[in-house]
Image (cartoon, rainbow, N blue to C red):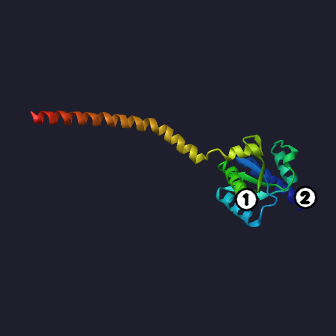
Amino acid sequence: MNKQEKKEFVEKLAKDMSEAKAVYLTDYKGIKVNDDVRLRRELREAGVSYRVVKNSLLKRAFEKNKVEVPEEFFTKSTAVAFADNDPVSPAKIISKFLKDVGKPEFKMAYLDGTIFGADEVEQIAKLPSKEDLLSKLVWVLQSPISGFAYTLNEILAKFVRVTDAIRQEKEKI
């Protein structure tokens, strides 16, 4: 890449970074090609952009966005994942892949203006997905209504049973 291409690449990287809900850095060194292809496919299906980037260019992109990242995260080989929709999905996919294959390892994550280290990213990966949280919220909101409807229904059912018992008593007489 010549200087102009690098400058354009950094501009695009900085733009992608500013538009993303979350940015994850991983050390992909040692991952086998077929595993890498599988990981990229899973990330792409989740709407996550994943690519290998030179540390110097990545550092410049962070600087363009006025994000101070410690130098320790710009060592070894680096791949970057941009989450446009669900900020937790890349952490979940990469964490699962890490358990299965042993690579890639997290370096850091950048979410909502905060930098998280590798250990914290593992905790992020354990968070429930947005869909799980929404379904739990619906259940919590629906539960009292369901209980109230059941109570009202039971009052009517009890009334019917009592009137039926009275009718049966009167028929016996």
Q: Whole-percent x and y of residue 162?
A: 23, 33
Q: Which mark is residue 50?
A: none
Residue occupied by mark 2: 3
Residue at the extreme front of the image, as rendered? 172
Furthest residue toward bottom:
34
Which residue is drawn at the image coordinates 81% and 53% (left, top)? Answer: 11
Outermost residue on the left side: it is 173
Instruction: List x then y, in percent, for residue 55.
Output: 86, 53
Residue at x 84% of width, y 47% of height: 73
What label does residue 101 carry, if any? 1
Q: Where is residue 77 in the image (x, y as percent from the top left)?
A: 84, 56
Which corner quadrant of the image does residue 133 belong to? top right
Local packing at callout 1 (Cα closer than 10 Å; few below 14, some 14-19, many 20+) is few
- Tell me the SS state at disc 1: helix
Type of residue at label 2?
Answer: Lys
Image side of residue 132 versus residue 74, left or right: left
In this rendering, would 161 be left or right of 12?
Answer: left
Q: In which quarter of the image is residue 68?
A: top right
Query: Quadrant location of the N terminus?
Result: bottom right
Q: Which residue is drawn at 49% across and 41% down?
A: 139
Q: Distance between the residues labelled 1 and 2?
A: 37 Å
Residue type at mark 1? Val
Work out whether 36 lies above or below 70. Answer: below
